[in-house]
């Protein structure tokens, strides 16, 4: 086996990485992971090591060193953290889908494990347990309210499209996935620390207060920016831009969704037969516009909480299922008319699909 001719246990990692990812640089990608700090990836790995020590015992019997194991763990955990929001379903379903994508995108990890003689079934078992643990950890440790998460995602897209922040950070060599993570973290911090009812403090003072709190709290995103050797004056300038933009646009977010929901509702009324179909279920004419608008608004909200799906039908099914499972007010209204939800589901799905295809 390859590792037998290499006294440095990390040589086998570099070998398979370079073999299967010839256009990428192992040291650079690993350095990017290390920048995320002990409060991010390392914290999760430490929890895994404490609560799933038996996994290490099983794997170590094959001769896999703890150094190699930790390197691989960093890649796996980072992959799950960066991609968790792309997957829906139960923890097991999400973990299985993530494992399949990880195997396709980072085949070199599995080649390393196989080179140490670890059986494929054991590899899958260990990986599924690790991925499942990370998914549960992310869900239980998240303290961001859904409303803040929704607004942060909308403002993130606005900052990407209307400021130079993303380009500025990219010029310092920060990977795209980390730029999104950093900018969103600053947006969330700002949203959690502003008082919408404060009409007396001027904008510059609000920005200055939040920037000072970011530095005093030494939040992870601030530490990560420093790790890229960006001059502190430039870091402060970038943070001011993000903070100011967030404060200026936080009220516009809800106004934007409201305007967008009205626009799409009118589009549905004028270009489809959905209003006519809903009338055939016995829904009063006067109630139909509000019902359609509520479904459109909910769809717009949910579509901002997760990364875009490659398949709109799949996303529509997920949104509809959540509406029904949470007994959304629209569902209760339809039931109050004596309508069986299974009978009207195709119409509701049409509204959701139409919204996803026509939202801006």
Image (tube, rainbow, N blue to C red):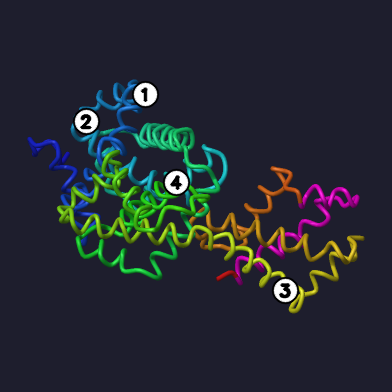
- Relative to 163, is 270 on the left or the right? right
What numbered label is drawn on residue 266?
A: 3
Residue located at (31% from left, 38% from top): 40
Tell me if residue 213 comes above or below residue 199 in the rendering. above
Q: CA distance from mark 4 to mark 2?
A: 27 Å
Q: CA distance from mark 1 to mark 4?
A: 20 Å
Range drawn in magenta: 330-358
- Label 1 sits on a secondary structure element that is loop
- Relative to 191, is 90 on the left or the right? right
Q: Position of residue 187 (x, y in %)?
A: 40, 52
- Which residue is labeled 1 in the image? 52
Q: Are marks 1 and 2 in contact (CB under 8 Å)?
A: no
Residue 114 visible here: no
Q: Earlier in the sequence, mark 3 or mark 4?
A: 4
- Label 4 sits on a secondary structure element that is helix
What numbered label is drawn on residue 334?
A: none
Q: Position of residue 222 (x, y in %)?
A: 26, 47
- Which residue is labeled 4 in the image? 84
Q: Which of pointers 1 and 4 indicates the residue nearer the eye?
A: 4
- Label 3 sits on a secondary structure element that is helix
Q: Position of residue 128 (x, y in %)?
A: 43, 36
């Amino acid at each position: 086996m390859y590792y037998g001719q290499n006294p440095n246990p990390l040589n086998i990692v570099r070998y398979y990485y370079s073999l299967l990812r010839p256009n990428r640089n192992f040291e650079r990608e690993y350095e990017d992971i290390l920048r995320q700090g002990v409060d991010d990836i390392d914290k999760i790995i430490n929890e895994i090591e404490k609560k799933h020590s038996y996994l290490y015992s099983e794997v170590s019997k094959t001769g896999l060193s703890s150094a190699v194991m930790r390197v691989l763990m960093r890649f796996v955990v980072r992959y799950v953290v960066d991609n968790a929001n792309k997957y829906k379903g139960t923890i097991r379903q999400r973990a299985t889908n993530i494992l399949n994508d990880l195997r396709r995108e980072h085949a070199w990890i599995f080649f390393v494990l196989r080179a140490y003689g670890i059986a494929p079934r054991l590899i899958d078992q260990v990986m599924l347990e690790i991925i499942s643990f990370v998914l549960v950890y992310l869900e239980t440790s998240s303290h961001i309210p859904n409303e803040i998460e929704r607004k942060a995602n909308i403002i993130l897209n606005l900052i990407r499209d209307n400021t130079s922040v993303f380009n500025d950070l990219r010029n310092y060599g920060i990977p795209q996935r980390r730029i999104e993570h950093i900018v969103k973290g600053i947006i969330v911090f700002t949203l959690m620390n502003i008082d919408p009812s404060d009409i007396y403090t001027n904008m510059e003072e609000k920005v200055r207060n939040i920037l000072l709190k970011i530095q005093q709290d030494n939040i992870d995103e601030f530490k990560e920016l420093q790790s890229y050797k960006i001059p502190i004056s430039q870091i402060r300038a970038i943070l001011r831009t993000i903070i100011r933009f967030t404060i200026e646009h936080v009220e516009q977010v809800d106004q934007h969704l409201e305007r967008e929901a009205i626009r799409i509702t009118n589009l549905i009324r004028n270009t489809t037969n959905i209003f006519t179909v809903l009338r055939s279920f016995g829904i009063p004419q006067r109630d139909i516009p509000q019902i359609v608008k509520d479904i459109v608004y909910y769809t717009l909200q949910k579509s901002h909480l997760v990364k875009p799906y490659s398949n709109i039908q799949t996303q529509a099914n997920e949104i509809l299922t959540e509406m029904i499972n949470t007994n959304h007010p629209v569902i209760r209204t339809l039931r109050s008319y004596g309508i069986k939800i299974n009978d009207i589901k195709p119409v509701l799905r049409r509204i959701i699909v139409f919204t996803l295809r026509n939202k801006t």
